[in-house]
Image (spheres, rainbow, N blue to C red):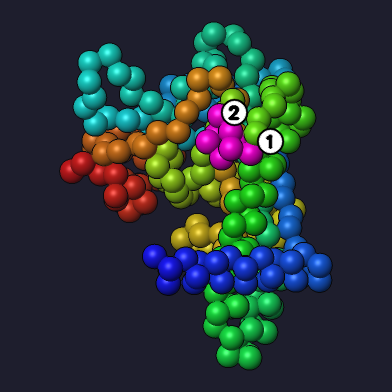
Amino acid sequence: DKVVGVEAKKLFDDAQALLKKIVSEKLLKAKGVIGFWPANAVGDDIELYTDESRKTVLTTIHTLRQQAEKAKGEPYYALSDFVAPKDTGIPDYWGGFAVTTGLGCDELVAKFEKDHDDYNSIMTKAIADRLAEAFAERMHELVRKDYWGYAKDEVLSNEDLIKEEYKGIRPAPGYPACPDHTEKATLFSLLDAEKATGIFLTENFAMYPTAAVSGFYFAHPQSRYFGLGKIEKDQVEEYAKRKNLTLEEVERWLSPNLSY
């Protein structure tokens, strides 16, 4: 289709030109923070410890387990499965991150809107979002090869990176494996993310600037992404107790996942 082809090429070229301007004039600023803690799984929770003695619990990451019926022999995953259980005595670790490329985005968008340039206003937001995802991807690579260093010898092509052929995952609160947005509050507190990056959480746990990504790091070689799917009331009630919240509060945040 020649019409779509020409328009797509124009959009791509315009985006490249705006990206070049953003980079050369430093119109957007990137900031990120990462952290790692001694950790072990206790049931479907992940305990984070203040130090290597693992005697004092710093905080707890709460995860949920799949319950929708599967084929015989298929595992029912929770993210806590990817951290060594406490009773094994195996010392394990867990990480978290928050990154943004949206600092300066509002000012640039406002400038375009003042000139009634909706096209570049929308494009700026789209570019900032893509840069945030790219920053998260690059940071994850540095974590695997350097900061955590559990895959020091990793050599992957760009295509392999896009296919996520690396060891470990970085699921985000609010996404299929951990749909509870309130876990972001624990993550942001651990990282002191607002002070470190300028990203803050709204009362509904959305991130601002919106060109931001945050999540958890798991290094287990068999860690994988999954969708929680529908869960039963028994788990929701137990989860509410673990988080010290009312059932109604938890049901509000998990409403798309409730089977009842």
Q: Quadrant of the N terminus?
A: bottom left
Q: Residue at x 27, y 29 (%)?
A: 67
> 7 or 168, which is in the foreground?
7
**Is 163 a magenta residue?**
yes
Tags 1 and 2 in contact by the CB under 8 Å rule? yes
Residue ID for mark 2: 166
Q: In this view, does 132 lie to the left or right of 142?
A: left
Magenta segment main secondary structure: helix
Q: What element carries label 1?
A: helix
Q: Relative to 229, is 32 above or below?
A: below
Q: Is residue 75 left or right of residue 100?
A: left
Q: Earlier in the sequence, mark 1 or mark 2?
A: 1
Looking at numbered disc 2 in the image, what kind of residue is underneath it? Tyr
Residue ID for mark 1: 141
Looking at numbered disc 1 in the image, what kind of residue is underneath it? Glu
* Mark 1 to mark 2 CA distance (whole Å): 9 Å
Residue 10, can we see it? yes
Which residue range is magenta in the image? 158-165
Q: Relative to 154, is 143 above or below?
A: below
Q: Quadrant of residue 126?
A: bottom right
Q: Relative to 203, is 109 above or below?
A: below
Q: From this viewpoint, which residue is outermost toward the top?
A: 88
